[in-house]
Image (cartoon, rainbow, N blue to C red):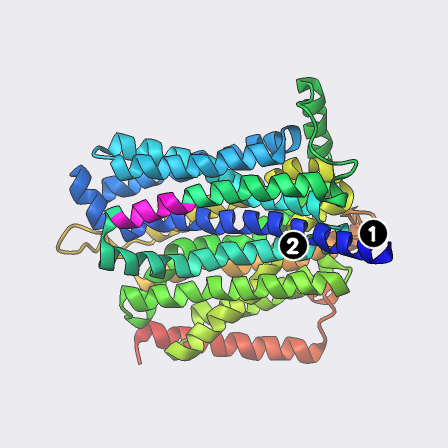
Amino acid sequence: MIANTMKLSKNLKLTSIMAILAGFIFYAYEYILRISPSIMVSGFSSSMHISSTALAAASSYYYFAYTPMQLAVGLLLDRYELKTVLTIAALACTFGTVLILMADHSFVFSVGRVIQGCGSAFAWIGIIKMAAIYMPKKYYGLTTSFGAVFGFIGAAFGQALLGSMVNSYGDTITLTLLILMGFFITYFIFNELSRAKQQNPYTQGIKEKAPTPAKKVAKQFYIVLRTPYVWIAGIIAALLFTPTTVFAELWGVNYLVKLYSYSVAKGSFISSMIFIGFAIGCAISGVLTVFISSKIKLIRYGSLGAFLLVICLLYIRMPFEVLCFVSILFGMFSSVQVLSFTMGRDVLPARLAGITGAIINLICMGVGVGFQRLAGSLIALYWTGEMSATGIRIYSLTAYRVSMLILPIVLLSCYLFTFLIDEKRKTLKFNSKKLRLLTTLPGILKLVKVSPIKIWALRAFAWKTQKATVTGENGP
């Protein structure tokens, strides 16, 4: 009888792992679809007879669908059967790719990207929901961290893999293979979540139920929104991920090309190292949560490390190899951001995991997009009027350096913000003395317990950084 019980327990764990693995693969697939248009610019432009600028505008419809869908995703995952919702989401991603393959006009292409964005919005929140349902609470942080690893691996390697396929087989065959992959993932999700629902012990008491009344859904939404710790988690997620959003996903390549006179390919390689670091760091962060109960301490040290590394990355000139290494380290320290999604699980039941993760992700993405626009506005503000022969604006190194000051500021803000969080009570410490300390530099140094020796070291580092910046601006 004991042997049969052990065998049953082993099978139950296997069904949990396979169900969550299906979600991981879906998240990686979603990332590949997200970046796919950047690989096939020339093919799409020629087939639809549009400029690369118009193609970029059509591709952006993915994000217009993805971002606002976060709130709807949380409600749907918490209200309807998880297997059904994720299966339809994966099928939507596949159908959107079919439309893009058939597109001979930018309108059809845009509709395909909207459908892809709607389906992709379920991937990350689906992992959060599955981790809450199919795994013990102790391994919730580990599960979501490894889910993030899959996503960033898709971001880091998907571009290289798609580029190789396009060069070897062309756009049509590449898209066809992505469609076939989408159908396989759809079946895999449906099959594994069906098995997990029937056999998994962790679904008892919290498994998916029939649709609940709209009034009850609204009440669940209200419960999540009025929980301060969810907003605290959203702010931390936003502050930690903003540098990756601004630098790695948008302005980093141009900044590196301008600073080091690198080629675009070389700048892209350095930028991709941040995603590699994020993937490694997410795995490490997930393992650490099993042994270290305080997530705030991990986030504090991670944000401090990311703050110091981003200063080195932006304002200290380094050889190419060292720059790649620093980029990986920066991604690793920034990856503690994934722990913010587990903070909501600490104060709310698993049945609200979908809404909780969606709200945290919405805050994270909304703030990130806002800082992207702010960085772009600062770059434009410092434009000197220089134009290229083809009529494209040329921005100075000073414009990029000023705009990138956003990155260390938000990371330092995240580090200081952690001192105001009461992890035991799951709220902020409304301590007037500590709030007064945050208003002055000596008070900040006292709050974070910086000794006079450390202050001297910081001054020496600042002087060295300023000297390196002046040297880089004036040339070698």
Residue 246 vertical placement versus 228 (above, below): below
Tell me, yes or no, whether the highlighted magenta stretch contains residue 343.
Answer: no
Q: For the residue labelled by badge 2, is the local secondary structure a helix, a strand or a loop?
A: helix
Identify the image quadrant of the N terminus: bottom right
Q: Amino acid at mark 1?
A: Lys
Q: For the residue labelled by badge 1, is the local secondary structure a helix, a strand or a loop?
A: loop
Residue density around tag 2, few if under 14, some if 14–19, many if 20 or more, within 10 Å: many
Tell me, yes or no, whether the highlighted magenta stretch contains residue 180.
Answer: yes
Instruction: Give percent across and percent down for residue 119.
Output: 47, 36
Residue at x-position 69% and y-position 63%: 298
* Closer to the camera in the image, 306 or 155: 155
Q: Amino acid at mark 2?
A: Thr
Where residue 424 is drawn, which disc sits there?
Answer: 1
From the viewer's perspective, tell me whether residue 14 is left or right of residue 56.
right
Residue 139 vertical placement versus 349 (above, below): below
- The image quadrant that residue 219 belongs to is top right
